[in-house]
Image (tube, rainbow, N blue to C red):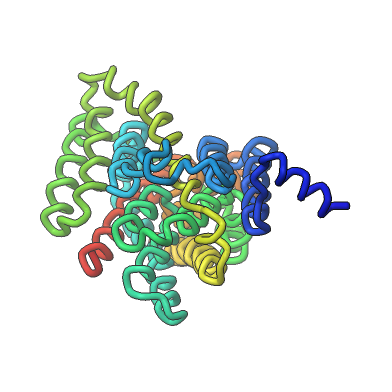
Amino acid sequence: MLKMIMDFLGEAGFTMLTYKELIMVGISCIFLYLAIKKGYEPYLLIPISIGMLLVNLPGANLMKDGGLLYYLYKGTKLGIYPPLIFLCVGASTDFGPLIANPKSILLGAAAQFGIFFSFLGALALGFLGPEAASIGIIGGADGPTAIYVTSMLAPELLGPIALAAYSYMALVPIIQPPIIKALTTKEERMIKMSQARKVSQKEKIVFPVLVMILVILLLPSSAALIGMLMFGNLIRESKVVPKLTETATNSMMYIITIILGLTVGAKANADAFLNPQTIKIIILGLMAFSIGTASGVLFGKIMCKLSGGKINPMIGAAGVSAVPMAARVVQKVGQEENSSNFLLMHAMGPNVAGVIGSAVAAGVLLNIFG
């Protein structure tokens, strides 16, 4: 009966899905469900899901030469969209907590350990150096950075790497709490941190300029990401171009996110996605993110001991660069233990440091393999 129906549809001119395409359509629908029903990063997952759906419908040819997504993808392939996202992130993020507590940068650095662990794991599994570097960067929990590095080093892996990176970013509230609780005691989670000092506007203006100069002089390959991140933050803190700040944090951010999401999803066609490599990438990505979270917390415990119990080690989990989701997770877990504990701004220091750290790590890997 089913064969008769399929034969009829074929004779009527309907293009039939292969079993692989059918699987990919199903995955895209699952992502849509998670985004719409569960609220997991809907701004990212909805465009990615639609891009994945469109590219796996036979006959649409949107990623073929001359297709709509083919031309939109040029901005991803050439590394244009991710730095523009960094500009928007910089414009919407307060670097004050990091400036007020410079030690936070150590927690951001510690959380990048997952990148290099998974890089070595990917090499052990037979991936080439540029591919391993692209997989490892998932550990930074920073989708634009993962896309940027992969588009430069291993564009053929862009689909699975981008989907893994954004999926784990969306699952931050699920993945991080068990790791935090497993590595800390109840007493540690209840630690209250003293209010950070107030940061002056002059400091906030000097900081992005200084970081831009120092980091790019030391690591020129990080210029696109660091430069745009600090530029975005400078227009925010200068207070003299409010229209630029408003544009970057609202309309520009959403436009770039739509285009980036569509084109990333469009790289997940059935033939490129459904293979053993993808399974390895998803597993390595989860390991990278989990180890990055764990290493941040463990370094936080060291800082807690050295400070005489004044630093809550949980803020180390925010060293991954999922801004501001990781910081919100720390706040939530802290309040579960002590409803009067407010750790959000303290966690934002490592969180911002993680964004800078992932960009620096990307620069290192690009410098080696680019």
Can residue 331 be seen here? The reply is: no
Expressed as whole percent of the image width and height from the top left, the position of residue 276 reads 56, 71
Residue in the foreground of this view, choosing between 189 and 133: 133
Residue in the foreground of this view, choosing between 40 and 132: 132
Expressed as whole percent of the image width and height from the top left, the position of residue 287 reads 52, 68
For residue 227, side relative to residue 9 (left or right)? left
Residue in the foreground of this view, choosing between 102 and 360: 360
For residue 307, side relative to residue 335 (left or right)? left
For residue 178, side relative to residue 65 (left or right)? right
In this rendering, the count of numbered labels is: 0
Res. 205 image quadrant: top left
Q: Residue at x 39, y 51 (%)?
A: 350
Residue in the foreground of this view, choosing between 26 and 120: 26
Can residue 367 be seen here? The reply is: yes
Locate the C terminus by quadrant.
bottom left
Among all residues in the image, which is located at the extreme front? 11
Q: Residue at x 45, y 63 (%)?
A: 292
Among all residues in the image, which is located at the extreme right? 1
Expressed as whole percent of the image width and height from the top left, the position of residue 181 reads 61, 60
Expressed as whole percent of the image width and height from the top left, the position of residue 351 reads 40, 48
Res. 66 image quadrant: top left
Q: Residue at x 51, y 44 (%)?
A: 325
